Image (cartoon, grey):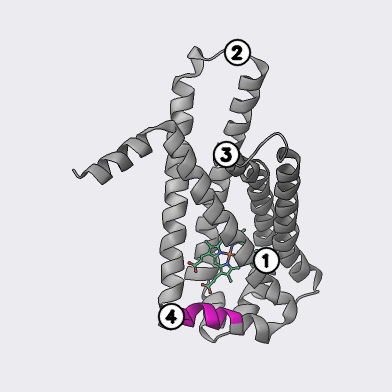
Amino acid sequence: MSATSCSLCRFWSSSIGKKFVVAITGLVLVGFLAGHLSGNLLMYAGAEAFNDYAKFLHSMLHGAGVWIARVVLLTALVLHVVATIQLTTANKASKEKRYECDNTVQASKSSRMMIWSGLTILAFVVFHILHYTVRIDSDLAALADGGDAYQMVIVGFQNVLVSIFYVIAISCLCSHLSHGVASIFQTLGLRSKKSSAIIDKLAKAYTAVIWVGFVSIPVAVLAGWLN
Ligand code: HEM
């Protein structure tokens, strides 16, 4: 094994290395969510704007762009999940050795919450990809194949149960983000006593925009504001 891959192995096996991987991949996913939301908000600009955007995504770099984005996203997601699960398992194993003070109890409670909200998001992402990317529903597939991604989203959210599931999953995602975004700054050493208040405010503002933006779409479809 080369010296480089050995130092990568050492980096990955250390808890600080894994925390760094969780932070950097978290940052990639946070950036993706902001980009995905910006694109989705084009639903409010009408069918033509949204369909042109969907067409552009699939034609970027002669069709290679969407696959490059998928590989980057999938790699970030897998590394994020694997590193988090390994950190939580190691944390559990050393639990007895730790002091039972309030801070420790609080930290383990919030990391338990992070694992559960994280697993719910994972289940949602699988459902979401089957729903709008693979399109297992033949009606949605026919709309998308005909170049009408706008109507595909409208018809998809006209199913009340599906819309309720999206709202619950997006709320879980935002609970995860409300803790995770501020933690990224902490892990990367960018959070000081002086900057912590502004970082917390920025993390809350980002989470609120993500929640309102994503939830507004199924709500607007069910209310008949988007049709
Ligand atoms: C109202 C909320 C949302 C709407 C309307 C929406 C819409 C869409 C659409 C139409 C696609 C298919 C893109 C294409 O292949 O043309 C898609 C893909 C995707 N969405 Fe969303 N999305 C929403 C929320 C989310 C959330 C909250 C997440 C992350 C947790 C997410 C993650 C993804 C991922 C990973 C893909 C697959 C990208 C690909 O490989 O094509 N979406 N979304």
Residue in the picture at 63% in, 46% down: 181
Mark with earlier residue (1, 4): 4
Q: Which residue is mark 4?
A: 61
Q: Earlier in the sequence, mark 1 or mark 3?
A: 1
Q: Which mark is residue 159?
A: 1
Answer few, some or many: residues within 10 Å of disc 3's Cα (few below 14, many 20 plus, some between 14 and 19). few
Report the side of 126 relative to 196 (left or right). Answer: left
In the drawing, does residue 134 fall left or right of residue 203? left
| Residue lying at the far left of the rendered structure | 1
- Judged from the image, the secondary structure of the residue bearing numbered disc 1 is loop
Local packing at callout 1 (Cα closer than 10 Å; few below 14, some 14-19, many 20+) is few
- Which portion, as a residue range, is magenta? 53-61
Residue occupying image coordinates x 64% and y 47%: 177
The image quadrant that residue 29 belongs to is: bottom right
- The amino acid pointed to by label 1 is Asn
Percent position (x, y) of residue 75? 41, 55
At label 4, the amino acid type is Leu
Distance between the alpha carbons at the discs numbered 3 and 4: 36 Å
Q: Nearer the viewer, residue 127 or 70?
A: 70
Foreground mark, 1 or 3? 3
Residue beneath disc 2: 100
Q: Nearer the viewer, residue 90 or 10?
A: 10
Whether residue 6 is visible to the viewer of this picture, yes or no, is yes
Q: CA distance from mark 3 to mark 2?
A: 26 Å
Q: Which label number is shown at residue 189?
A: 3
The CA span between labels 1 and 3 is 45 Å
Q: Position of residue 137 (x, y in %)?
A: 53, 71
Label 2 secondary element? loop
Q: Is residue 63 above or below residue 98?
A: below
Q: What whole-number distance in Å separates the C-alpha atoms at marks 1 and 2?
A: 48 Å
| Image position of 107 with respect to 226: above or below | above
